[in-house]
Amino acid sequence: MSNKNENMNGNMNNDIDNILSDFKEQKDKKEHMSNEPLEPPKRRENAIDFAKTENDEQSKKASKRKKESKSPEELEAIKAQKAERHAKQKEKNKASFGKMKKVIFNKKFLLALGTVIVVIALIFGIRYAIDANKGAYLKPYQSKYPDVQFEIGMLEEYCDMLGENPDTVGYIEIPELNLKSAVSNDESKFPYAQPCTENAEQFNFVIYMNDNSLEKYYSTADAYNNASGYITYSDLFKDYNFKVVGAFYTNTKAEDDNGYIFPYNTPEKMTTKSASEYVSRLENRFIYSTGANITRQDTLLTISCPTDYRKDFRFVVVGVLRKDTGSKSTATEKSDVRYPQIIFDEMGKDNTYKYASKWYPEIIITNNEGEQKTIQRTIDDYK
């Protein structure tokens, strides 16, 4: 028993000795590490110096570039490489130009190019020949009347008339009057035409006569039914047949119709709304009805004549462009006619139109660029 206890005590003593020995060894090692010198701090030039100026930084970079400069041999080699690249590019450009030259001076190419030139020349030559041929019929008249300008497209049958009367703008035939006459643009000559505003499309040929001879043929329904009902007019470029669709009396002084003058003598194309208003007001004024259906797309002929019916009044006959020259309309009297106010006063009747608006047209003007604008007419345009 005693031997066993002795062995246990011996083992414990050995374990204690081992622990103490390890502790001593770690202590010695720690003391040795604490005695080693500390690493000195980094020098300032190795860190970012925020106080350094831009000039200092540029000087440093310049110094670095100086250190990195090429040697004469290296520079010469770089120069030689550049020269070689330039020479290769030059040869390449020369080869491309040579190919292009071969293509341009190739017989097939030259033949094709020549063909194109000939075709273009032919096109212009043909167009010139056509234009020259179109105007060939005018040459005798240009020689005969050197001071008169003849336009290509005008009808040859009117060339002598224009040569003898250079102010001619139209030609009119009225069977009832046995009238066959040139129409002038000079207001001192009769018949003469109302000019159309420049750059406006004409929809109404307005002709002024110097006597009242037409009135007896179209002033009543019976007179109309005994007349031919047709009038021929030409603008020198085309002949037109107009079917008479109505007639009316109108004032030329505003005081005779409550400060209003009906703008019957408007030759220019109007806006859609104005054209519709014009047709409606025109039909209200007709003395009789012919059953004609006038639309805003129609082309009109308006003949204005002096009258003895009343001072400062005009008698107006209206025709619409039609192809059915063989048909004849029958006129019937109307019970409701829009006369100027002074006529109602003379007849002792109430004017049912006295509160109607004083309408004036809005016409369309087209400039050289094709842009359209509208102009609102006023009473001052018709006084």
Image (spheres, grey):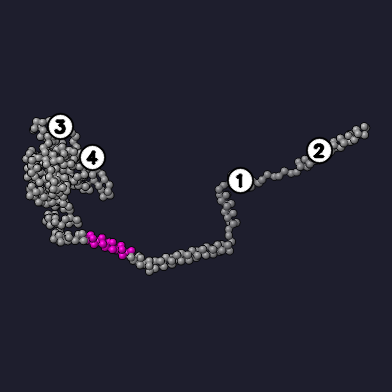
Q: Residue at x 57, y 47 (%)?
A: 53
- Amino acid on which the number 2 mark rests in the picture: Phe
- Amino acid on which the number 1 mark rests in the picture: Ile
Q: Tell me the magenta residue range.
A: 116-132
Distance from disc 4 to disc 3, alpha carbons, whole Å, reads 23 Å
Query: Which element type, helix, strand or loop, lies under badge 1?
Result: loop
Q: Residue at x 21, y 44 (%)?
A: 297
Residue 199 in view here:
yes
Distance from disc 1 to disc 4, alpha carbons, whole Å, reads 85 Å
Query: Which element type, helix, strand or loop, lies under badge 4?
Result: helix
- Amino acid on which the number 3 mark rests in the picture: Thr
Q: Earlier in the sequence, mark 1 or mark 2?
A: 2
Q: Which mark is residue 273?
A: 4
Distance from disc 1 to disc 2, alpha carbons, whole Å, reads 46 Å
Give residue 116's position: percent from left, percent from top. 33, 63
Q: Residue at x 13, y 46 (%)?
A: 327
Residue on which the image places disc 2? 23
Distance from disc 3 to disc 1, alpha carbons, whole Å, reads 103 Å
Distance from disc 2 to disc 3, alpha carbons, whole Å, reads 136 Å
Q: Which mark is residue 352?
A: 3
Q: Which mark is residue 48?
A: 1
